[in-house]
Amino acid sequence: MIQHAEAVRRVPLNRDRVLQAAVVLADEVGLDALSMRRLAQELSVVPMALYKHVANKEELLDGMVDTLVGEIDPPTPDVPWKTAVRLRVLSARRVLLRHPWARPVIETRTNTTPAVLGYMDTFVGMFLAGGFSEDLTHHVMHAMGSRMWGFTQEVFDDAGRQGGNPKPKAAPEVQAAMAQVMAENYPNLFRIAVSAAHDDESVVGNGCDDQFEFEFALDLLLDGFERLHQRNWTSHRSEGA
Amino acid sequence: MIQHAEAVRRVPLNRDRVLQAAVVLADEVGLDALSMRRLAQELSVVPMALYKHVANKEELLDGMVDTLVGEIDPPTPDVPWKTAVRLRVLSARRVLLRHPWARPVIETRTNTTPAVLGYMDTFVGMFLAGGFSEDLTHHVMHAMGSRMWGFTQEVFDDAGRQGGNPKPKAAPEVQAAMAQVMAENYPNLFRIAVSAAHDDESVVGNGCDDQFEFEFALDLLLDGFERLHQRNWTSHRSEGA
DNA sequence: ACCTGAACACCGTTCAAGT
DNA sequence: ACCTGAACACCGTTCAAGT
């Protein structure tokens, strides 16, 4: 009897099962609640058992990012570089929006795994295939930054929040008071808030369309890259200083 | 005697002293080592004493960011918007480079303090003073993102590392082996690495000039903003969808 | 080979008590 | 009013032991 029960639950807990469980758990309970202890519990195992498959928590997080990379579409063949880059970035973005824990985890990675290097490599490949010089491609990749992953460090929005609780909206009279305070103390912010909200409900809450803003900046950069490419831009690192 | 000794050490520990000490401690020992307990110890006080001046650790971090904001230069008067924005961003960047803990802390802030709102407000003001529409200014601020703070989420570099340990560079034969592996597995990354390193020592280590890359992307965006402004660009939020 | 138990050295924070 | 002591409910990780 005991033998049988053990056989049932002892699906032998390989690295993949650990990573898979970690992703599911993080999706469900959020990053803060993802501890080695809690993950072990979810797998009906003592915390220490995890350390046979993952060196430490950092490596667990590295592995979780690797599974994300696998969800991003490969480059679309036979389209211009700009389309290819755009499609791939937006694919990455969809993946990221499905896994809210991913942004902070990617931001804090300090090791670059082979899977991540592979992703970067195909990303670089899209520019090179489009005829970009190595030099321009290099700087372009830097300018892409985390946009390569489908996100940017947003300064206004609350997308970074933990639990998915949307902004609790205040009572109308409180909103009016807030608008008053804002107009007095932050006149410039007030101007753009009013302007942005003119077909929106609330003046003070952020009625921003994150997807629009993301694509706005992305396209601004892509257009800039295109212009530099057409001009055969080069950094002058080998000349001056 | 006891009375006197108490009087000496009991500089009464107000909010400012707590924040100041926190900044100094974070500068010295890094963000990970900044705990409420350690901070209390530094102030010769029991951990709980801090909670009379700061609601919790989040509020401590908020306060630390506020002190940073105070170190950023105000907008330079009587210069074109582009110059003003550029100078201010680079001032913010210098502040950030002095306080390596600031980037991750800013990234995780979820409350916007009055000091931060004030900073944003004067930032917005530079565009409005330059004749930008509220609409364009709004999207431009989003596109700036964390560049407003003088940083971007860098994907290549190791600036995000904790203690300031610079990359340990490998022995020449190891480097050669790494280059071999890289050329085989990541041919595109290899191409730009070789290109970037042609007057640099190492092919595999990143010989990237962070400041150059930061300004490259910043200027690309500023040029893009300028072009949109000259064209009287508008988002078409009120028309279509 | 793979998993476990007990322990170590930490966290942030609460609560009731001291002066 | 301001600070303290002791405790609670957690962490990640090590080490020696079990099967």
Image: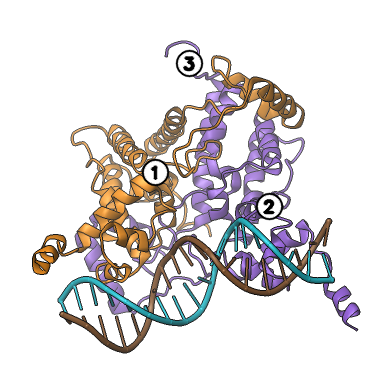
Chain colours: A purple, B orange, C brown, D cyan
Where disc 3 sits, the SS reads: loop
Checking the image for residue A149, the label placed there is none
The CA span between labels 1 and 2 is 26 Å
> Does A65 sit above or below residue A47?
above
Residue A131 in view (yes/no): no
The quadrant in which the C terminus of chain A is found is top left
> Are the residues flagged by discs 3 and 1 in contact, CB closer than 8 Å?
no
Mark 1 belongs to which amino acid?
A: Pro
> Are the residues flagged by discs 2 and 3 in contact, CB closer than 8 Å?
no
The residue at which mark 3 appears reads as A236
Determine the chain carrying the residue at label 3. A
Q: Residues within 10 Å of mark 2 (few under 14, many from 20)?
A: many
Check if mark 3 and mark 1 are on a common chain.
no
Checking the image for residue A63, the label placed there is 2
Q: In this view, does A42 lie to the left or right of B20?
A: right
Where disc 1 sits, the SS reads: loop
Mark 2 belongs to which amino acid?
A: Gly
The residue at which mark 1 appears reads as B100
Question: Closer to the camera, B12 or A104?
Answer: B12
Determine the chain carrying the residue at label 2. A
Give the number of the mark in front: 2 or 3: 2
The quadrant in which the N terminus of chain A is found is bottom right
Q: Position of residue B106 (x, y in %)?
A: 39, 52
Determine the chain carrying the residue at label 1. B
Q: Where is residue A219 in the image (x, y as percent from the top left)?
A: 54, 41
Question: Closer to the camera, B162 or B44?
Answer: B44
Where disc 2 sits, the SS reads: helix
Mark 3 belongs to which amino acid?
A: His
Give the number of the mark in front: 3 or 1: 1
Q: Position of residue B125 (x, y in %)?
A: 26, 47
Q: Residue at the spot x=56%, y=18% of the render?
A: B201
